Amino acid sequence: MIRSIGLIELNSIAKGIETADTMIKAAKVHLLLAKTVCPGKYIVLIAGNVGAVEASVAAGLECGGAYVVDELIIPNIHPQLIPAINSSTEVERLRSLGVMEFFSIASAIVAADAAVKAADVELIEVRPGIGIGGKAFVTLTGEVSAVRSAVESGAAAVLKSGMMVNKVVIPSPGKELLQSLL
């Protein structure tokens, strides 16, 4: 089970590929994701023990330099986070719906982890900036009060970054909406 993750988001594809190489060579980490996202950004997501993730991200930040847009280290991630990033969650029923929208992928991941740790909700997806102008968003479901609490906790976790665009809670979404979210 993955316990710790690190991510670096860059505004250069070439520098992103070099940074990914640097990160996987710097410490014993597993490369979970290294790919382009809109608009011409590159993300590198790694996992490993906390010390290795910290060393890998530090090396990546040094390599990426001025091209780094955002970064994160989460030492103890919630088990729902990786399936939500990989779009492999299996939500059977859409109850109330929470949506959080961000200017950076790192902020979306931090907010999703905080949200799911704060309340009894199910992450539907953490969508990383592909085809949406580099933005990212998080969708989650649960009872209305839990979704409100989760969305507020997620928003609070990234408040200082200034990367949040908007957040909404839909208490009773239409039944057809779940299919469009998956």
Image: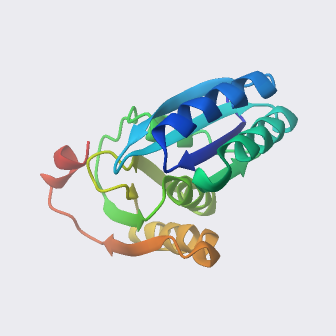
Relative vertical location of residue 127 with respect to residue 164 in this rendering, above or below: above
Q: Quadrant of residue 114?
A: bottom right
Q: Could you tell me residue 66's position as x and y percent?
A: 63, 55
Residue in view at x 81 percent, y 42 percent: 54
Above or below residue 134? Residue 150 is below
At x 49% / y 50%, what residue is drawn? 11
120 left or right, relative to 48: left
Residue 140 can be seen, yes or no: no
- Left or right: 89 in relation to 25: left
Front residue of 12 and 156: 12
Question: Looking at the rendering, in which quadrant would you find the N terminus?
Answer: top right
Q: Quadrant of residue 115?
A: bottom right
Q: Observer-nearest residue: 93 or 9?
A: 9
Is 70 on the left-hand or right-hand side of 101? right
Frontmost residue, 124 versus 37: 37
In the image, farthest residue toward the right: 51
Of residue 124 and residue 156, the one placed in the foreground of this image is 156
Could one spot residue 97 in this view of the protein?
A: yes
Work out which quarter of the rendered image holds the C terminus and state it.
top left
The percent position of residue 112, horizontal first and vertical second, equals 53, 56
The residue lying at 45 percent from left, 41 percent from top is 84
Name the image quarter holding residue 75.
top right
Q: Residue at x 60, y 72 (%)?
A: 161
Question: Is residue 72 rendered to the left or right of residue 28?
Answer: left
Residue 136 versus residue 165 in the image, above or below: above
Residue 126: image location, x then y, percent? 43, 48
